[in-house]
Image (cartoon, rainbow, N blue to C red):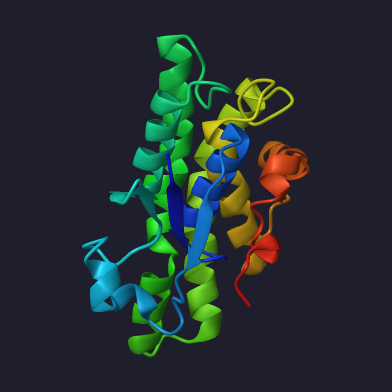
């Protein structure tokens, strides 16, 4: 099986997928997509991903899009090590934690939203306050869940789906200097997960892009 990941190094969604691929221990090729240069809007890329978003994972030449769908596909096709718990109730909890990040936090502070705010003449201070507001709202819901379910990682004692989402979101929060002191369980879990070799290898600083 040949895997090619169209990725942007600082973007949260491909960062999640890099973590998942690394945790599964499968080889894959990175094809950088320059978001600053709008390469994701090029005709050849949109032929793979109609939304013009990253990531796109090519599986033997066939595209998969949307990071959560890709991570679930990985877990279904490569069951070990598992990204999700075994029991249905715990699986639903872990999915819910991941979706707080993927569905409620990230869409409101990704690049296309920030560009639109700039186009509306919203200054950097107000833009950063926007980012902090939505990260804070999501983290306030997520914090007690991490505090309840964390073990060595954000959900239990093995790295999994929640870590795939949490580490990039905390990286993004740090980029925008969001105060994480109200969220000690999140900050601790993300820092601990970031030291795992497979997760550390997915960090933006370790990607082939300049």
Q: Residue furthest top?
A: 87
Look at 30% across and 69% down and name the residue there. 45
Please provide percent x and percent y for residue 43.
Answer: 23, 76
Q: Give the farthest residue toward the bottom.
A: 121
Residue 190 on image: x %, y %: 69, 43
Q: Nearer the viewer, residue 81 or 162?
A: 81
Q: In what quadrant of the picture does the C terminus appear? A: bottom right
Q: Quadrant of the N terminus?
A: top left
- Across and down, in percent, residue 195 comes to 78, 43
Report the residue at 40% width, 21% height from top.
Answer: 92
Position above or below: 173 against 78: below
- The image shows residue 151 at horizontal and vertical percentages of 71, 22
Residue at screen point 38% across, 41% down: 70
The residue lying toward the viewer, choosing from 19 and 101, is 19
In the visual, does 13 lie left or right of 41?
Answer: right
Residue 175 appears in the rendering: yes
Pick whichever, 102 or 121, lies toward us: 102
């Amino acid at each position: 099986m040949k895997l090619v990941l169209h990725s942007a190094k600082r973007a949260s969604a491909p960062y999640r997928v890099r973590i998942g691929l690394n945790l599964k221990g499968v080889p894959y090729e990175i094809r950088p997509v320059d978001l600053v240069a709008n390469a994701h809007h090029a005709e050849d890329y949109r032929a793979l991903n109609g939304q013009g978003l990253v990531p796109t994972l090519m599986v033997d030449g066939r595209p998969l899009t949307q990071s959560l769908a890709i991570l679930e596909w990985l877990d279904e096709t490569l069951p070990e090590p598992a990204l999700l718990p075994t029991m249905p109730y715990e699986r639903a909890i872990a999915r819910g934690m991941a979706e707080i990040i993927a569905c409620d936090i990230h869409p409101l502070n990704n690049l296309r939203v920030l560009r639109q705010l700039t186009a509306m003449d919203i200054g950097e201070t107000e833009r950063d306050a926007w980012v902090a507001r939505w990260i804070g709202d999501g983290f306030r819901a997520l914090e007690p869940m991490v505090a309840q379910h964390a073990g060595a990682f954000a959900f239990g004692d093995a790295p999994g789906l929640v870590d795939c989402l949490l580490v990039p979101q905390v990286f993004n929060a740090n980029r925008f200097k969001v105060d994480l002191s109200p969220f000690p369980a999140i900050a601790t879990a993300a820092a601990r997960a970031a030291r795992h070799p497979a997760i550390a290898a997915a960090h933006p600083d370790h990607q082939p892009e300049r």
